[in-house]
Amino acid sequence: KLFKHMKTNNFAFYLLQIMPSPFDLFFDFFAKRKKITIIRCIHDLRPHTGEIWPTNRAIKRRIRNADVLVTFSDSIRKELSEITSKLVLRADLPDKIFPEHPTLINRVKCSKQIPKLVILGRAKAYKGFETLAAALPIVKSKYEFYAFGEGVYPDSLKAYGTLHNHWQTDFQLGNALNLADIIIFPYIEASQSGLIPIAKGLNKFIIFSDIPGLIEQVDTYSNSIMFAKGNVHALASAIENAIHQVSTKPDFENETPIASHFNNSLATVVKNYVEKV
């Protein structure tokens, strides 16, 4: 219906595409015919391990077909500027997100219990599950491990915790965040994670790999430890350190929620561009 509408009506001047989709190239065809400016968000410049879409060819074509590019990452922006002369706009993910869902705010107090290690999101190879599976047996401190998300997990990971291998609803995600003392991001490839601002907003302890985009997001957040991506012993050491910190510090209190808008948001960046042209 949308394609038909685009063929028969002059209803738009701009097409903003936020997430990659196999339908992008169809949209591009109709948008070019109708002389609609394509503003496209670029999250990554290469396909991830274990991901079918997008392919290298599709990523290059998505960049080539766009009129304006937007990215949330400085590292991605720099790479884009080296391979294309197109205008590249830089937007920010919020530093912290304070969810309104009550299960995300009223966290369970776990300081006197065994620390809970949690990994969230789709189980994909680029998220470093193999590294995590190799690191957990090395950790000597007591912990409970939980994974929440649909996908393919390493068989060895099942021996060290509980795997909830299904799509997480908002309510289930809230319960997972409530449960967590430490949230782990052992990515080996990525740009940024939408879960890091939520983890920061709830004052969770974060362990993350030294992916440039993740470094940008975590920034100066104090309740965090960075380790070298793919380094099993470095991750195990980071987990030991994090367990010690959450076990000896008083319960982290949720901070006062901030306004939901932020100066360099995607909406603001695109709005400023449209107004200029």
Image (tube, rainbow, N blue to C red):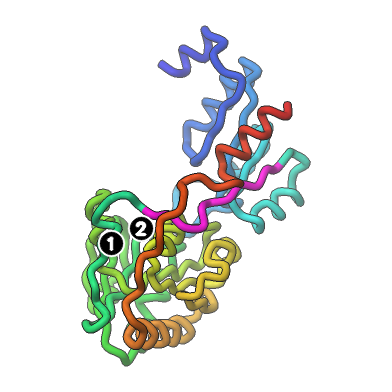
**Quadrant of residue 246 in the image?**
bottom left
Residue labelled with disc 1 = 148
- Horizontal placement of 163 versus 196: left or right? left
Label 1: element kind: strand
- Horizontal placement of 209 versus 212: left or right? left
Q: Which mark is residue 121?
A: 2
Among the two numbered marks 1 and 2 on one chain, the one whose residue lies closer to the N terminus = 2
Distance from label 1 to label 2 (Cα)? Answer: 6 Å
In the image, is residue 192 above or below residue 134? above
Mark 2 nearby-residue class (10 Å; few <14, some 14–19, many ≥20): many
Q: Amino acid at mark 2?
A: Gly
The residue closer to the viewer here, 58 or 165, is 165
Mark 1 nearby-residue class (10 Å; few <14, some 14–19, many ≥20): many
In the image, is residue 66 above or below residue 53? above
Q: In the image, is residue 165 part of the stretch drawn in magenta? A: no
Q: Amino acid at mark 1?
A: Phe
The residue closer to the viewer here, 44 or 145, is 145
Label 2: element kind: loop
Q: Which mark is residue 173?
A: none
- Please tell me which residue is depicted at 58% across the width and 53% down the height of the picture: 46
Q: In the image, is residue 96 part of the stretch drawn in magenta? A: yes
Q: Which residues are magenta?
A: 88-98
Which quadrant of the figure contains the N terminus?
Answer: top left
- For the stretch drawn in magenta, the main secondary structure is loop
In the image, is residue 61 above or below residue 254? above
Which quadrant of the figure contains the C terminus?
Answer: top right
Q: Position of residue 147 (x, y in %)?
A: 28, 66
Q: Position of residue 241 (x, y in %)?
A: 42, 87
